[in-house]
Amino acid sequence: MRRFLLAVVLPPIALLAQTQTIEVSLERNQAGVWKSIDPGLVLDQGDLLRFRFRTSFEGYLYVINSGTSGTQSLLFPGEGTGRNNRVQAGKEYFVPSTDASFRVAGPAGHDVIYWLVSPVPLESSPAAMLGRPETRPSGKLIPRCDDSIFRARGLCIDSSAGPRNVGDQELPNMTKRELQIVQDKDKSRVSSPAGLSGPVIYEFRVAHR
């Protein structure tokens, strides 16, 4: 892979006792208009993306991208994507939080994007919580159209893309939590019926040609 698949494109000039939830949707810029898309949609080179995010609890959001070559980068917070990563319960956010966007580039495959919400700011790099690059699934996934999913002509939906629980080997430095993930149209809801006293982490796979 030449570089990590999602690159920041600068403009020219997301703990309570009840069920805790995180809502996230993927949006693509189409002719200057941002539209929510199916999280399994296989994207094309040059597509511009952003995420819409909301959580039912307060914390600090970190977004890490793991590319197909094993290259890893902190997408958010960052100089081009926004420095303020504190999220409040019930408030909607965009990632990037600036007017920037992410551009799809590089060889066909899946970017594995890790979303981590911590109740307190992390003192060390969030990447230190992940396992070795070779244990991550990004380089092993090839986008495929799922013929069992009925879609309009011309759309390719990969059912392995979108939000997922993190694999056993990917969190050597964190307590693994099984989260419930429900897809509601173009919005994904990640939840835990039990209160969470530590960081919450899940992955969002972005498939592209």
Image (cartoon, rainbow, N blue to C red):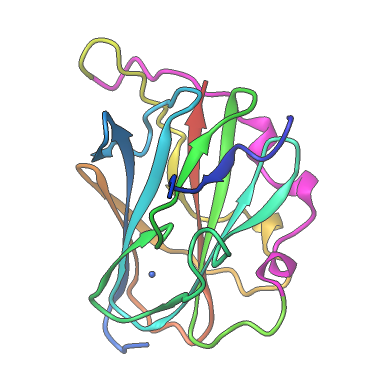
Residue 102, x across and y down, in percent: 48, 44
For the residue pair 35 and 140, the one nearer the viewer reads as: 35
Q: Where does the N terminus fall, quadrant-wise?
A: top right
* Figure quadrant of residue 190: bottom left
Tell me which residue sits at (32%, 81%) in the image: 88
Residue 40, x across and y down, in percent: 38, 33
Tell me which residue sits at (41%, 60%) in the image: 98
Residue 82, x across and y down, in percent: 48, 66
Q: Which residues are magenta?
A: 125-150
Residue located farthest toward the top when viewing the structure as drawn:
153
Residue 33, x across and y down, in percent: 23, 38
On whether residue 204 falls in the magenta region, the answer is no
The answer to whether 87 is drawn above or below residue 45 in the figure is below
Tell me which residue sits at (74%, 68%) in the image: 128
The answer to whether 61 is drawn above or below residue 69 in the figure is below
Tell me which residue sits at (49%, 48%) in the image: 10
Secondary structure mostly seen in magenta is: loop
On whether residue 137 falls in the magenta region, the answer is yes
| Left or right: where 33 falls relative to 177 | left
* Figure quadrant of residue 41: top left
| Left or right: where 148 falls relative to 209 | left
